[in-house]
Amino acid sequence: MLTLDKIYHAAFVLKDVARKTDLIEAPKLSKDCQLYLKTENLQATGSFKVRGAYYKISQLSPEESAKGVIACSAGNHAQGVAYAAKLAGVKATVVMPTTTPLMKVNRTRSYGAEVVLHGDVFDEALAYANELAAEHGYTFIHPFNDLDVATGQGTIAMEIIKELPTVD
């Protein structure tokens, strides 16, 4: 269960990894409401995904860490997992569809992940990532359907509430 205590813990774990990003009012983007933008593009990987990936990796047992992690993504999650694993000293494998833009493949590799290109579409890459996880004992890091990933990403909401307590 996702709890406020867990999100506070994640914020503590992430304090030296994820930068606290600004909340900027964007009045010209909408006439009908007060709109704010959270500048998560300023994270080291250009996305909020590093928050969930790093927190997930930080919660692995020593045995799980020793075996490594695996993810499937064609973009931001791939880079978040690769970067987070590098910081944590954990081997990362990322399966990406063969149609993934070369820039995203190279950026993921630049963070130290082994990139495996497989399948023409995401579902084929995902199936292969699950096969590799089972074969090698890697921990699969889902981009959103994982309690630890959601907890790490929940730190964004905490920052928003601290900066804009009247948010609805």
Image (cartoon, grey):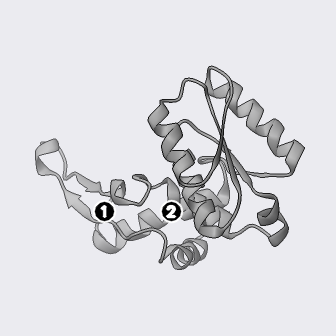
Residue occupying image coordinates x 39% and y 60%: 43
Q: CA distance from mark 2 to mark 1?
A: 15 Å
| Closer to us: 137 or 29 | 137
Give the residue pinned by disc 1.
Answer: 167
Q: Is residue 29 above or below residue 101?
A: below
**How many marks do you count on the picture?**
2
Q: Secondary structure at mark 2?
A: loop
Q: Is residue 40 above or below residue 87?
A: above
Three-letter residue code for mark 2: Gly
Which quarter shows the C terminus?
Answer: bottom left
Q: Is residue 20 left or right of residue 12?
A: left
Q: Is residue 168 above or below residue 105?
A: below
Q: Is residue 89 above or below residue 53?
A: below
Is residue 13 visible to us here? Answer: yes
Q: Which mark is residue 154?
A: 2
Q: Secondary structure at mark 1?
A: loop
Q: Position of residue 147 (x, y in %)?
A: 66, 58
Three-letter residue code for mark 1: Val
Q: Position of residue 68 (x, y in %)?
A: 76, 57
Q: Residue furthest right?
A: 135
Q: Position of residue 88 (x, y in %)?
A: 63, 69
Q: Sequence order check: which comes first, mark 2 or mark 1?
A: 2
Residue occupying image coordinates x 71% and y 58%: 91
